[in-house]
Image (cartoon, rainbow, N blue to C red):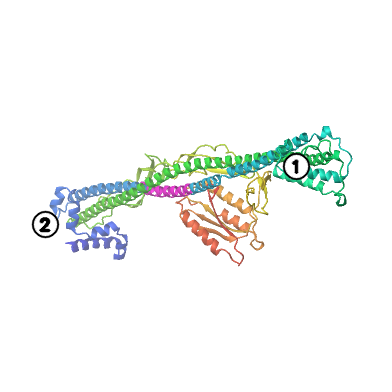
Amino acid sequence: MLAAGCFVVLAALLLHRGTCATIRARLSVRQRRAVSMPVAEAMMHVQHILPTDVQQLFLHDNRKLNHHGERTLAVIDQMNGLARNIQEELDATKLQCDQSLLVLDDAVRQLGEDQGRLETDLGYEQSGLTEWESRKDSAATVLSKTLLDEHNAFCQHEASGIRAKLASANSDFRVSQSVIGHTNCRHNNSGNNNTATANAVLLEAYMDSCLSGTHNQPSHHVLSGLSEGRERQLWTSLMQAAAHRPRGEATTPMRDESIPTSKCSVGGSALCPVLLNSFAVLIGETYRDIRRLNRRLEQLSSECDSGRQRFNQNIAGLQRAIDTANAQVASHDARIERLRTDLRLARRTATQKAAERAEKAEECREAQEKAETSMCGMIKIRGEIAIMANTTELIQDCEVSNWQYGECSASCGDHGGLQNITRSVVSEATPKLGTPCPPLNAVMVCSRRPCPVDCQMDGWSEWTRCSADCGYGTKYSYRNVLVEARHGGAACGARQQSTACGGGVRSRRRDVLVEAKGRGTCPGKDSTHRYEEIPCNAHPCPPHPVCQSKADIVLVLDGSGTVLLEHFDSIKDLAKSLVRQTALNATAGHAQVGVVVFSHEATVASRLTDDRTSLIGAIDHTQWAGREAATADALIKAEQVLQNGVSEPRELGESTIVHLRHTSIT
């Protein structure tokens, strides 16, 4: 029966079309499938919708219809109505599936972009956390060295030594004055003008009697209060006076009145001028030492106060640095936790959406396959009915083009927008026999996806206090993220900016020539006695500095979806500014620059070169792709540029990769 049916259909087609090749070419996929489908299979697919009287036709032994044309047309028309219903159901299923799959595809794509942005932001936050923890540890390490305690201990030790010397000098001064008072020389000096021999003899007698320690005379008790150094100095003076005795006059008799009646009383004798002169010298030197020690004590106090102030300033600066670092560590920790939570949610949601998309695609495939099979079955049964009625006219169903989609009334939203779709007729249906054309116009829901949420940040904070009270330092300004970017919204900009403050510092240090021995002391290396600082270069920096160091630099431009198009233009402007403000001449020992741009893939825009015009042109030609961020691939590509970009042998300069993102530099 199948062979006979096919022969009748083909014979009719030959009458109308001419050749078998032409027939085969004009048969649609659906028609070819219908021709090859067995009648039993076709009946199985459509019997649930076929009218009972049509089904009965295939149960009788004689299945030939009445040759009456109206009866044939009525049955075929009834079959075409069913086919049109199936076609409309198929169109609705296809549109609904296309819309659902488009929404799911958008969701999966957007979640992928969100994951890329979150991973990039997380990397930067972790890098910032590491940086601030390092700053905190460095400040804490310096703070823990207790340099102020060492300075205070040194000052206290030095001051104690000076005060001990000052106390001894004051004591010697008082003792010397007391000795003068006990001699009564100032009031009873009635000695004669004897010779130096008599003076020497009297000195020896005085030394033997008054300084021997065996007499309980007032002068002896006073002299015993002299310090060892001063007593030695006095003895030396007296011995020098005794040494002036002429050798030949050693036995010259003395007048009786020149010998003092009391062993420790020199009043009225020729010994008084010598003794007074020795003690006058002693008192003068002692007084000079007292003044010198007092001045040194004042100088030490001033130096120690200055050093203590400097150390306190450094300690305050270090403590501010630690406080700032603690605040930033806490801020980075908080955002890292939020980003990790969002990243886990994005990954889980992406997995769910991908599975949902696969499930929906399979569901749509099965629904469309079922409707398409029903259409083929309906065409097959209709062809069998035409054969049973001995109809020789070719049956052509209406064929239409694919849908053409108009503009959507909304770009996003929970309910999306509306979109007009149209299609045109490719082949008209055979009058009265072919299935009429389905609707050529329809309205569908479109852009049903979450709207982008731009990152929202608060305003920049006031500049922090300079990290150094004197000399070069840094001050910072911060801002916090209020709302994280989602669904392809504008990514967050830089959260921190810094600027130099305080100018520079010139310093000088004194080295130790001879190490301290015994109980001697030596100032510490950071003591004000050995280390001095003065500010320098406090004037503002030039507005357009030029980098003249020798370096191999690769600029990595972020053209991913984490950066808006207008931000990418700003990144390009920043890159060109860096190129303009860098001395480029590899042969002269200056820099050469390469350029890499990336989104979902990394591209080398320029190898290492010192051609400024070429570099700026390469940057101008870079394009914003706006897809997921392949940051790791870009950094690997930049390393390859550094390794392979030198065209001529030369000494390797400092290799630097500069990542430009949101008009910030890392």
Quick check: 512 left or right of 61? right
Q: Residues within 10 Å of mark 2 (few under 14, many from 20)?
A: few
Distance between the alpha carbons at the discs numbered 2 and 1: 173 Å
Q: Is residue 36 visible?
A: yes
Q: Amino acid at mark 1?
A: Ser
Judge depth for marks 2 and 1 and give the one in front: 1
Whether residue 422 is visible to the viewer of this picture, yes or no, is no
**SS label for mark 2:** loop
Foreground residue, 507 or 208?
Answer: 208
**634 or 170: which is nearer to us?**
170
Residue 153 appears at what percent x and percent y? 60, 43
Q: Nearer the viewer, residue 356 or 20?
A: 356
Of the residues under marks 2 and 1, which one precedes in the sequence?
2
Mark 1, residue position: 209
Specify whether residue 207 is painted magenta: no
Label 1 Cα neighbours within 10 Å, binned few <14 / some 14-19 / many ≥20: some
Give SS at disc 1.
helix
Number of the label disc, if any, that sits on residue 84 = none
Q: Position of residue 374 (x, y in %)?
A: 23, 52
Would you say residue 118 sits in the magenta stretch? yes
Please state if 411 lies on the left or on the right of 298 as rendered: left
Which residue was labeled with disc 2? 62
The image quadrant of residue 337 is top left
Number of marks drawn: 2
Q: Nearer the viewer, residue 587 or 20?
A: 587
Is the C-beta separation of discs 2 and 1 under 8 Å? no
Kind of residue at disc 2:
Asn
Specify the farthest residue to the left: 61
Q: Give coordinates of residue 528: x percent, y percent.
A: 66, 45
Looking at the rendering, the stretch of residues picked out in magenta corresponds to: 103-126
